[in-house]
Image (cartoon, helix red, strand yellow):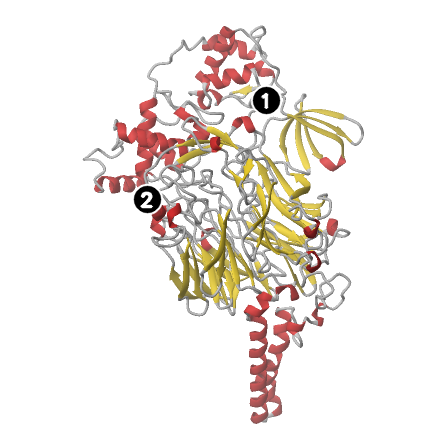
Amino acid sequence: MFRRWCVGFVGLVLMGVAGQPAIGQNPLAGDAKAAKAGEYEFRINCALCHGLGARGGGRGPDLTRAVKKHTHSDAEMFQVISNGIPGTAMPANGTNGQGVGMTDEEIWQIITYIRSQEVKAPAQAAGNAARGKDLFYGDGNCSLCHMVEGKGGRLGPELTSVGGSRTREAIIESVRDPSRRLAWGLTESTKEFPQEYLSVTAVTGDGKQIKGVTLNEDSFSVQIMDMGEQIHLLEKSKLLSFQKSRESAMPKYGADILSDKDLGDIVAYLISVGAK
Amino acid sequence: MTGPGVRKIERQRDVGSSEAPQQPWKSGASAPRRGTPLHAGFSPGGPQGLKAFASPIHNAALEGPLFHGTFRVAIRLLEAGLMLALFASLALAQVSFERLVNSAKEPQNWMTYSGDYSGKRFSGLDQVNITNARTLVAKWVYQTGATGKLETTPLVVDGIMYATGQDDRAFALDARTGRPVWMYQRQIPSDIRPCCGRVNRGLAILGDKVFLGTLDAHVVALDSKTGNVVWDVVAADYRTGHSFTVAPLAVKGLVVIGISGGEYGVRGFIDAYDAATGERKWRFYTVPGRGEPGHESWEGDSWKVGGAPAWNTGTYDPLTNQIFWPTGNPAPSNRGEGRAGDNLYSNSLLALNADTGKMNWYFQFTKHDEHDWDATQVPVILDTPIESGGKHLIAQANRNGFFYVLDRTTGKLISANEYGKTTWSDTKDADGRPVANKDASPTLEGHTVCPGALGTTNFMAPTYDPQAALFYVTARDQCDIFSTAPQPYEAGHAYYGSAYFPSEEARPYRGFLKAIDPATGQVKWKFEHTSPTWSGVLSTAGGLVFSGDAEGNFIAFDAASGKPLWHFQMGGAVYAAPMAFAVDGKEYLAIAAGSAVYAFALP
């Protein structure tokens, strides 16, 4: 893949887009006009997940952070945009089924734009990650349902990488108001929308009530994890009742339960883990 | 539509009515080979029929000379056998224009993208019906072995299935077993520019050839027995964003096909090629040039990159010799600045003379579109009974969320009714056409409009069931944030002029199968899928409607009530439309899902 990118890059140089930069450098680095063109390309190709202004959306990380998890140099960023990141929702250029792939030049424009938006230093104090870890596994009760680095519960989304893929604001919002935007769960490669952490109540043929979250679902069957982390594989036609709710199974953590400072420390912990 | 005169849409004259010829495929018929008029004396059973006429050659060539010792007799037998075999193969393999016009007389075959020229996607087969559908089983699966979506509708003629796959594959299968007879794989340049996946929606068949439109904007004729290339012509330059994904339509001696590339600022066109030679017989530019009517609906030079592609298969009315072909969005798709005017003939239905490509009339559904609402949905030909006016109609469930019924003689609008969630139009013009609200345009900061850019429906094929007199369509309720992102035109580059993405506030996006009464425009029933699907819909004389879902199910519904009667989990999302065929008296349902084609039948 690197070789292919090199060829593309050499082609660009031959086309006279830039002077004589070393391989791996952005030929458009610092070019304000390119950054503007990149802003529009970003809106078309990237904003769906990374948000308008590159500040992160419900799905993709905040790209205005100077330190990024998967990329450091422009060359690495070019590769990530071109090839995607396996095991994440980041697709390879031109493979998301909708829209069209970008040219090499357009990718450099986007990188130039992202660089122009980066905030060099965090605006706020990061919080106390060590204290946040204690709260996560202790009084905050987070780990009853959430797992980080192999420790914790299974009912809610696994959070090891959440600090690297969500903005600080998005994490805070999903603690204060979990139902506003339900987390995305299982992603099937050929399905357009992933499963969400919907709350469900099912009553089986023998009258047994099952409460939990959906692991997956189609029109005829549902796979549920109940509050005790038991998996139930159910055929809908055999249920007495089946109700879904977009009210998250996670309680709202208001400031009276979890202070701003405590929450800030927990988020600092998640961000420190997510940056690893 | 208000008056009682059009309350009931007439049943298709030649399907499911008393005038229809004997249909041996009806349930209860024990001998399917008892012949339709077209096959008098021959077996329509495909392979078996061929075998019957192949045997004289065998007898003559081997047994004749060796066992009877009389060469003259042998040669005569051989000649007779060869002639019979030749005649048999011609009669069985050749798909004449007459057979396509009278396709309802041979419901065992599925010879055009929509099953017939009217676009109904209705099968006259009823062996599988509401009482036995629950016993359907999978009969075979054909894996293409490639990744990416399958959007193909297979054709079946005399026991052989012809279908397409990713990257312009084409293949012929034994329709009873799924075993390949031939395969064709095009060598596509690495720098093609398909907008929405390396997809293809199927083949057309005429004579002894099948026809494929390719991602590098060629039209290719393949020999239907071998898959060999007979001719290959260039329609346009793929490097400027032209491509074909559409299933062509064979009409008379022509192969009619529409271009894709609305995302690249192509100037759209519909072409007709001589099926025998590949020579282009006519081209209709969907964006009028200088001096042509409609040219004034474009600002400045915007017409040169005006889009209006024609990427879905149209329909044909043999009575008036008109082709009805729908067109797509003006380019750039989401930015009206710079192309002031109605932007004819984008997002329109065109009535073209099949022989000349000359336009008889047009109807524009969405004027000066800024939301990517291609009007490329299959336009379905319908007729009302003589006693209620004998109206010749054409209906389309449009991507903009309205269901339109037009008079297909004049192109005049009869009714337009909302069939999904829309916010873009609160008023109608004097003709009854929905008009865009002033605040529906995309803005820099982003503005939510319903339906979203993917539309209430899209390329997924609808069906009209003349028995139930209902129109079935896959629909979605999703709203998008439309935000402007001005782009200069650059040849071969994406040319949207805007960004759109699903509005988080509007989640969850909901997907449905809806049954619309064309007489009233009202939704009679709807089935809500777990999530929106891209599957097309098929209706059959068995009182059934078939569709697929994003979770990988193939589902049989009661056409009258929308109740699911049976389903099968295929393991991959559906982006294709189902079809039906019969071989040796057995009815099959087929659909593509994931990377495979599936066939189902009664046990």
User: Residue at position x 38%, y 31% from top?
Assistant: A42
Q: Name the residue under label 2.
A: B300
In the depicted view, which residue is nearer to us: A40 or A246?
Answer: A40
- In the image as oriented, which residue stretches furthest toward the right? A206
Local secondary structure at mark 2:
loop
Looking at the picture, does residue B138 appear above or below residue A257?
below
Left or right: B187, with A190 as reference point: left
Q: Position of residue B303 (x, y in %)?
A: 36, 47
User: Residue at position x 65%, y 23% from top?
Assistant: A229
Local secondary structure at mark 1:
loop
Q: Mark 1 points at which residue?
A: A156
The chain containing the residue under callout 1 comes to A
User: Where, quadrant-wise, is the C terminus of chain B in this rendering?
Assistant: bottom right
Which label sits on residue B274? none
Quadrant in the rendering for residue B523: top right
- In the image as oriented, which residue stretches furthest toward the front? B430
Q: Count how many numbered circles sit on residues in the image.
A: 2
Sort mark 1 into few (<14), some (14-19) or many (20+) by Cα contacts within 10 Å: many
Left or right: B564, with B570 as reference point: right
Disc nearest the viewer among 1 and 2: 2
- The three-letter amino acid code for the residue at tag 2 is Gly
The chain containing the residue under callout 2 comes to B
User: Residue at position x 53%, y 41% from top?
Assistant: B429
Quadrant in the rendering for residue A83: top left
- The three-letter amino acid code for the residue at tag 1 is Gly
Q: Position of residue B592 (x, y in %)?
A: 57, 50
Q: Where is residue A228 in the image (x, y as percent from the top left)?
A: 68, 21
Q: Position of residue B511 (x, y in %)?
A: 60, 38
User: Does residue B259 appear anywhere in the picture?
Assistant: yes
Quadrant in the rendering for residue B477: top right
In the depicted view, which residue is nearer to us: A52 or B306?
Answer: B306
User: Does residue A190 appear anywhere in the picture?
Assistant: no
